[in-house]
């Protein structure tokens, strides 16, 4: 493969990017280790964007040093390929999505940029929980799936299956995925999008050995299922790869079955953008028009040593040109576009301008973060926020080793949080240290590595600690909170939010947030529909961090003028709960009565805020405070004879085994355990299984700390924070 072909393809890509019917924006989605990186590399090599011998070895997409070292895909990177089908050439923009759910935010964002996706699953392991997660993410964004069943060679070489058994396995996998697809889709798409071997939306093959086959390709080439079986049985996968090359078969399938941007945006825009669909911009996006205003969603920020911060995203309407002024929605000033380019692995190919329907890399958008809406219209309604399936659950403190690096560290942390919104950076007000929270131990380890190796700041880090949440088990109050001058009294009831309301806030279905709620009437209706009582829903005043404040009072004089301060007190109380000063979650805080001084001078912030806060805290004490801890699902693949050791390790960590499956010589264990107990699991399970266990984890929300452990855990958190170990009881907050 000469350089010539790559150059030639780049030239073609520059033409094709102007013809949306010849564009496919796609991604691959899979459980970790099922072969996504190997597949992407082979596609890129096959399409002539890299030399064939290097495919599978060079790992173009895993270009981050850290990823190379660990051999896993962390960042969603992009590559463009040109593929000919029925005498026409197509531009295929492939976004590689990370397989590790610690980086789930990246996966969801990548889904926003693409219209179709290759669900990849290993023929031996079959559908895994992360496969399911990514299918859910794809369908939610109306991204159309096709299926690639990978590692088919293993069925024959390792499991020694008969042709009959091989077909049965395929059928099981396809049925399982179809069941999920049907459950997640509206009726209009259920059958259209269900996978079908006959239709050709299912492809089988081996990414590692570079071959693939589909029914349409069988018909075209005359290769039969039995031929494939025989090739593999005889160890002739090289020959098979010549007859049925992976990139050919799979990219043909992509072009035939996955939508072009013109088709996809009609379906997708109403889902991902809630602005007026009949407005000029709405129409331009639905029609993928290059003549409308510019509308772009940033899915990723790359930090390039030369170009600085580069925003990568999907252009839904209009064009992006060098020198153009664009607004990152929510920011006051415009940003000037410095460079526009197509991306190919680590390379970016500069272009003068690019039209709607493409994935584009832009430098100069200094206000953009991953998830930003960028437009030539400063008033544009932003795209729907991208929902994270998990929230940060582990925190470390970071400090610069050298005092002189402190300003640089502050800057680096800002960039890191911009590029990866699933990292949260906060300053501890008491100690002034930087606290960095992430999705798990590995996520933080990798981020620390980046800070040191890529940004060149040496740092010290604390041992990781778990993030908890506070909630209540019952109903408490009305509790009276008095202002320091005794002239104002507030009465609060605290209880748990309806589970459906909580889910709707978490999932972004209720997208209102904060203390200035725009359309309160519509919001009240939405809450009522989710099961909140009508008179409660009507009183909605604020939503913060999955908690709500309701005003249930009627006709209290001066309360209106005081409400802003009540909301402020609510925010404070929800950020620092009364049990262990952790954040509250799922709280319904109701103001049921108030007595206010007639003179506004006696009801300023210093009076109202502590009074309301104490009333909230007191009511929560009476409602039985509970502590919630983050839980992780754990999947372990271990040889049968070592299974006992792995299970013992999990059980010592308050873990529960949910399920076990035999696959050949291996056992696949599904378990769950508290994150707090999972630190150091990597080393211990390695030791217990002589390094022969493959495993990974996925965050699974918060659950109540076992009753008998709560006092101990609360005491430890409080001591760590320099508080007295025992929390205060209700009497402390009132008389
Ligand atoms: P990712 O985590 O999904 O990106 O998976 P990788 O592409 O890194 O692959 C994980 C492992 O599976 C690597 O050791 C690959 O060499 C191996 N692998 C990938 N595809 C195949 C295949 O078709 N057959 C076999 N036997 N191994 C494969």
Image (cartoon, helix red, strand yellow):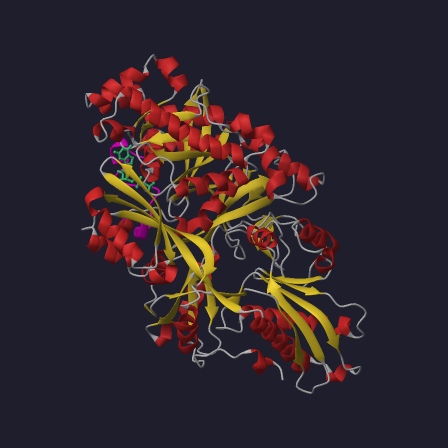
724 sits left or right of 59 in the view: right
Question: What number of labels is visible?
Answer: 0
Q: Main secondary structure of the magenta part?
A: loop
Q: Is residue 420 visible?
A: no
Q: Does residue 374 sit above or below 570 in this rendering?
A: above
Write down the quadrant of residue 276 in the picture.
Answer: top right
**66 magenta-colored:** yes
Quadrant location of the C terminus in the rendered image: bottom right
In the foreground, 555 or 358: 555
**Residue 384 x/y as whole percent:** 59, 48
In the foreground, 497 or 29: 497
Q: Does residue 132 sit above or below 69 in this rendering?
A: above
Q: Does residue 490 sit above or below 175 in this rendering?
A: below
**Residue 503 x/y as whole percent:** 56, 52
**Residue 530 x/y as whole percent:** 65, 50
Quadrant location of the N terminus in the rendered image: top left
State ligand 1's quadrant: top left
In the foreground, 431 or 304: 431
Q: Is residue 476 visible?
A: yes
Taking the spot 58% from the left edge, 40% from the top edge, the residue there is 316
Magenta extent: 48-68
**Residue 134 x/y as whole percent:** 45, 41
**142 magenta-colored:** no
């Amino acid at each position: 493969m000469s350089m010539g072909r790559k150059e030639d393809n780049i030239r073609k890509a520059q033409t094709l990017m102007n013809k949306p019917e010849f564009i496919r924006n796609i991604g691959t989605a899979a459980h970790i280790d099922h072969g996504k990186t190997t597949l992407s590399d082979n596609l890129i090599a096959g399409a002539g964007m890299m030399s064939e011998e290097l495919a599978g070895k060079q790992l173009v997409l895993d270009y981050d040093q850290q990823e190379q070292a660990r051999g896993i895909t962390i960042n969603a990177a992009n590559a463009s390929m040109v593929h000919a089908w029925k005498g026409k050439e197509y531009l295929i923009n492939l976004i590689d999505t990370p397989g590790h759910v610690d980086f789930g935010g990246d996966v969801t964002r990548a889904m926003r940029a693409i219209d179709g996706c290759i669900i990849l699953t290993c023929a031996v392991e079959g559908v895994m929980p992360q496969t399911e997660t990514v299918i859910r993410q794809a369908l939610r964004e109306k991204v159309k799936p096709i299926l690639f069943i990978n590692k088919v060679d293993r069925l024959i070489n390792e499991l020694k299956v008969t042709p009959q058994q091989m077909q049965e396995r395929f059928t099981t996998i396809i049925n399982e995925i179809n069941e999920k697809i049907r459950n997640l889709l509206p009726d209009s798409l259920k059958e259209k999008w269900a996978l079908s071997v006959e239709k050709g939306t299912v492809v089988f093959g081996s990414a590692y050995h570079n071959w693939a086959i589909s029914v349409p390709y069988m018909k075209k080439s005359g290769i039969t299922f039995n031929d494939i079986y025989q090739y593999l049985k005889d160890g002739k996968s090289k020959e098979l790869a010549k007859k049925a090359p992976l990139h050919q078969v799979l990219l043909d399938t992509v072009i035939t079955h996955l939508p072009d941007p013109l088709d996809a945006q009609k379906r997708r825009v109403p889902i991902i953008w809630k602005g007026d669909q009949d407005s000029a911009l709405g129409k331009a996006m639905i029609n993928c028009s290059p003549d409308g205003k510019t509308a772009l969603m940033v899915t990723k920020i790359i930090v390039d040593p030369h170009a600085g911060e580069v925003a990568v995203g999907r252009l839904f309407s209009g064009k992006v040109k060098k020198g153009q002024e664009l607004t990152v929605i929510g920011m006051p000033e415009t940003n000037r576009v410095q460079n526009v380019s197509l991306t190919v692995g680590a390379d970016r190919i500069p272009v003068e301008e690019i039209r709607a329907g493409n994935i584009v890399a832009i430098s100069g958008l200094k206000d953009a973060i991953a998830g930003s809406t960028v437009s030539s219209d400063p008033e544009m309604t932003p795209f729907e926020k991208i929902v994270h399936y998990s929230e940060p659950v582990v925190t470390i403190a970071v400090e610069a080793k050298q005092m002189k690096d402190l300003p640089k560290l502050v800057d680096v942390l800002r960039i890191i949080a911009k590029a990866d919104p699933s990292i949260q950076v906060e300053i501890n007000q008491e100690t002034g240290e930087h606290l960095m929270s992430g999705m798990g131990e590995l996520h933080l380890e990798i981020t620390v590595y980046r800070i040191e190796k890529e940004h060149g700041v040496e740092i010290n880090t604390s041992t990781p600690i778990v993030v908890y949440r506070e909630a209540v088990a019952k109903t408490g109050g009305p509790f009276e909170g008095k202002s320091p001058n005794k002239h104002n009294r507030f009465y609060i009831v605290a209880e748990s939010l309806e589970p459906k309301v909580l889910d709707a806030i978490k999932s972004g279905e209720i997208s209102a947030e904060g203390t200035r709620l725009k359309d309160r009437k519509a919001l009240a209706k939405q809450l009522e529909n989710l099961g909140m009582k009508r008179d409660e829903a009507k009183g909605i005043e604020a939503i913060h961090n999955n908690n709500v404040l309701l005003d249930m009072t009627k006709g209290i004089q001066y309360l209106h003028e005081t409400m802003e301060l009540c909301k402020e007190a609510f925010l404070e109380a929800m950020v620092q709960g009364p049990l262990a000063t952790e954040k509250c979650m799922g709280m319904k805080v109701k103001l049921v009565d108030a007595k206010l001084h007639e003179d506004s001078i006696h009801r300023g912030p210093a009076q109202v805020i502590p009074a309301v806060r104490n009333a909230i805290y007191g009511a929560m004490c009476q409602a039985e405070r509970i502590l919630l801890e983050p839980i992780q699902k754990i999947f372990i693949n271990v040889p049968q004879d070592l299974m006992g050791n792995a299970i013992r390790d999990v059980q010592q960590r308050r873990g529960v085994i949910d399920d076990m499956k035999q696959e050949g010589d291996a056992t696949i264990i599904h378990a769950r355990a508290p994150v707090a107990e999972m630190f150091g699991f990597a080393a211990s399970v390695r030791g217990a299984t002589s390094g022969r266990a493959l495993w990974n984890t996925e965050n699974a929300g918060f659950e109540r700390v076992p009753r008998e452990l709560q006092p101990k855990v609360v005491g430890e958190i409080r001591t760590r924070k320099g508080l007295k170990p025992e929390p205060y009881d209700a009497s402390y907050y009132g008389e």
